[in-house]
């Protein structure tokens, strides 16, 4: 059953009409379906069967506390990329031992907090970071468990801004430098390499780059084994794509099966970690917005809505495509609109060339924005960030209130007189 659906000419999230959410919460607002979120996580988890694994949800895709808590309750772990995300997951009830810490630029204070909290492992991305972790663990009188994030130099066939596993990207350790880092770790007293990790990019719609990356990791596992290094896990990162328009990404089941087949072809039975973000929350969320004006310029028709690029940056940042649909189609001729926000930037569009039957005041839904939607929102143009709502059955809960105007400048001050 589709949890976002029309019923008698009205669009619903599960058992709640969007008109009801708009009249109680206001617009713009993000709306998530609990059922979709949980179903997506389960699809990944079930696909593993009894193969030892962990799912570390990538918090950066959507770090709302309520979402993190639902995932915690299902038994998810978390992939974090900052001290702020560590704080969020702890606040939501996550266990430090269920977290891995990724990212190229971890600060001293972030590493210290993560080690003190007892995080499962730090995914190290350079010799300099390994050195830093070793030093900090030393001052804490601890031994830090690490995974080396390698750069497998695989083309993920995705938007260049979200490709991360190519040699020229800033991410990961080049494969030929790994033996040196293993030696460096061996000589250091406060680090212990327990795994190898990689993450080659986001919104991948084919399986072959994942398989190629895992193959590279496995070659390394065997060569390191010959040097006496015994690993405890492999981490293939996140990146599985979702459907925004007419893409046909693999389902989580096919993705996991392809990974497990690659492991078994190489007779590897190490536990496998994955870090999906987008593929769990992306299609579990939409952005509800109201049409303020309809206007035309030359051959273009514009629907000016109350959501903008500060709410949803993906179209401006990546040229990303999101479908827009009516909450309740009006009884007017369908027209092709560019759906744009009120911000003073030509890049402020939510979607182009959408065929819609609308009048001013109507509600629209921007689809597939659960990942990298609210998480990337800002206050540009002094616009308060939007509310977030989770629907469960015929109930809904505000899980983030609209920001107030005074919150916009609460950390600012003027010079002394
Ligand atoms: C962003 C990121 C992810 C999640 O990527 P998705 O495409 O949302 O699945 C996982 N791991 C790392 C290290 C990341 O940077």
Image (cartoon, rainbow, N blue to C red):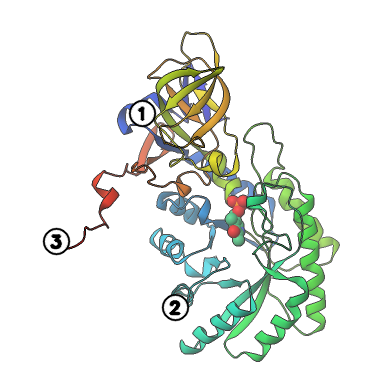
Q: The N terminus lies in which quarter of the figure?
A: top right
Q: In the displayed image of the protein, which residue is found farthest to the left?
A: 417
Counting residues from the N terminus, which is met first, the one under dot 3 or under dot 2? 2
Task: Report the label total.
Answer: 3
The residue positioned 66% from the left and 91% from the top of the image is: 187
Q: Which is closer to the viewer, label 3 or label 2?
A: 3
Q: Which residue is mark 3?
A: 417
- In this rendering, would 145 be left or right of 269? left
Q: Position of residue 384 (x, y in %)?
A: 33, 43
Left/right placement of residue 257 relative to residue 352 reads right
Q: Position of residue 339 (x, y in %)?
A: 50, 27
Q: Secondary structure at mark 3?
A: loop
Whether residue 276 is visible, yes or no, is no
Relative to 242, is 290 on the left or the right? left
Q: Residue at left 38%, top 36%?
A: 396
Residue 282 in the image: state x and y as whole percent.
56, 42
Percent position of residue 124, x then y: 61, 73
Q: Which residue is the extreme one toward the right?
A: 265
Q: Nearer the viewer, residue 246 or 383?
A: 383
Q: Residue at x 73, y 59 (%)?
A: 166
Q: Which mark is residue 272?
A: none
- Gap in angstroms between the C-alphas marked 1 and 2: 44 Å
Can you tell which mark lies on residue 22? Answer: 1
Q: Which mark is residue 116?
A: 2
Q: Nearer the viewer, mark 3 or mark 1?
A: 3
């Amino acid at each position: 059953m589709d949890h976002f659906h029309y019923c008698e000419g009205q669009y619903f999230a599960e058992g709640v009409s969007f008109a009801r959410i708009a009249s109680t919460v206001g617009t713009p607002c993000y709306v998530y379906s609990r059922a979709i979120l949980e179903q997506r996580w389960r699809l990944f988890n079930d696909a593993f069967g009894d193969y030892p694994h962990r799912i570390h949800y990538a918090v950066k895709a959507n770090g709302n506390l309520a979402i993190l808590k639902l995932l915690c309750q299902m038994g998810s772990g978390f992939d974090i990329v900052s001290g702020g995300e560590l704080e969020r997951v702890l606040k939501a009830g996550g266990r430090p031992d269920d977290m891995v810490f990724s990212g190229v630029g971890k600060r001293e204070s972030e590493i210290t907090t993560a080690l003190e909290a007892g995080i499962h492992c730090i995914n190290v991305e350079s010799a300099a970071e390994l050195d830093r972790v070793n030093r900090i663990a030393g001052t804490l009188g601890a031994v830090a468990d690490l995974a080396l994030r390698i750069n497998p130099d695989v083309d993920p066939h995705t938007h260049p801004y979200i490709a991360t596993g190519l040699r020229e990207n800033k991410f990961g350790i080049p494969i030929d430098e790994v033996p040196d880092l293993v030696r460096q770790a061996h000589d250091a007293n406060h680090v212990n390499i327990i795994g190898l990790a990689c993450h080659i990019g986001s919104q991948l719609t084919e399986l072959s780059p994942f398989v190629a990356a895992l193959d590279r990791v496995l070659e390394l596992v065997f060569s390191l084994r010959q040097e006496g290094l015994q690993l405890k896990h492999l981490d293939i990162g996140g990146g599985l794509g979702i459907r925004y328009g007419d893409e046909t990404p693999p389902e989580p089941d096919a993705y996991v099966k392809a990974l497990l087949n690659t492991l078994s072809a190489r007779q590897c039975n190490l536990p496998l970690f994955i870090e999906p973000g987008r593929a769990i929350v992306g299609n579990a969320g939409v952005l509800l917005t109201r049409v303020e004006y309809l206007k035309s310029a030359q051959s273009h028709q514009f629907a000016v809505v109350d959501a903008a690029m500060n709410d949803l940056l993906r179209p401006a940042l990546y040229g990303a495509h999101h479908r827009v649909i009516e909450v309740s189609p009006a009884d007017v001729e369908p027209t092709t609109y560019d759906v744009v926000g009120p911000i003073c930037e030509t890049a402020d569009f939510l979607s182009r060339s959408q065929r819609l039957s609308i009048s001013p005041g109507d509600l629209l839904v921007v689809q597939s924005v659960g990942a990298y939607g609210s998480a990337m929102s800002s206050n540009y143009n002094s616009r308060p960030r939007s509310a977030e709502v989770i629907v469960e059955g015929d109930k809904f809960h505000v899980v983030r209130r609209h920001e107030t105007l005074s919150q916009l400048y609460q950390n600012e001050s003027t010079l002394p007189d």
